[in-house]
Amino acid sequence: MNIGIKDVLRRIDIFFVLYLLFLVICLSLKFIYSREEIYFAVNSQYNEAADLFFRFYTNIGDGLFTIAIAVVLVLFVSYRKAFLLATSYAVSSIIAQILKFAFDAPRPKLYFAERLQGIHFVKDVHIYLVHSFPSGHSVTAFSTAVVLTYFSRQKAWGVVLFVLAVFAGYSRMYLSEHFFEDVVAGSVTGVITTVLWLSFIDNKQFLHAPKWQNALLKKQAA
């Protein structure tokens, strides 16, 4: 196999184009508005239905959700795809953790410690205080979306997975777990790391052997 970065980007072309547009919009907003302005603009838009929705929806950016998908791939799709998803998650998560501890940035609840009465917090959501940059959930959501788009033969899935990842990132701001910058940086980390990793690891010959196309509960390939 000879898979390069261009080949990976070609497979996720619709997702990647949408992501670039999204990134341009995010960077433009960052130049126009301050951290505080963006945070309170998001925090002021809440209701009970959204509280309930984002409280649970944010879990699609949790590593356990990605691991669950990998398990489904092992059982029903192929060992290769499960391996690509699991290792992409592992690599992007390690990089995210390194960045989190390197920057050691405060999260909104600590950053606005003297203004908490004016902030809406969703009931029964544990709010963390440190290691805000970048958003780990955003890293995982965008990394997982890239890998699943890479697998998909239907281009429309790139649009769906992009939207799901964006909402996962937004949920982190809605829940006051992260700032806008954390989410954007998390998305960049997830996308770039995963594209580079796929272009490296999916070149390995062993992943394209017939046995790696099997799954535990799928009819074995010859």
Image (tube, rainbow, N blue to C red):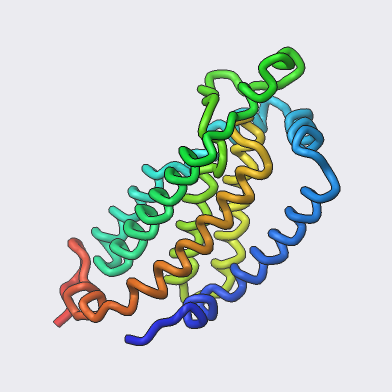
133 vs 89, left or right, is: right
Q: Nearer the viewer, residue 178 or 67?
A: 178
Where residue 64 sits in the image (x, y, percent)?
37, 42
Q: Is residue 170 above or below residue 194?
A: above
Which residue is the extreme one toward the bottom? 2
The answer to which image quadrant residue 172 occupies is top right
Q: Residue at 28%, 69% (x, y): give it.
A: 80
Residue positioned 19% across, 62% down in the render: 217
Residue at 85% x, 48% y: name it. 32
Residue 132's spot in the image, x, y percent? Answer: 56, 35
Q: How many marks?
A: 0
Residue 105's image quarter? Answer: top right
Q: Image quarter for residue 70?
A: bottom left
The picture places residue 200, in percent across and down from the top left corner, at 37, 73
Image height of 92 relative to 12, above or below: above
Q: Quadrant of the C terminus?
A: bottom left
Q: Position of residue 7 (x, y in %)?
A: 48, 82
Q: Residue at x 67, y 66 (%)?
A: 20
Vertical order, 144 against 130 (above or below)? below
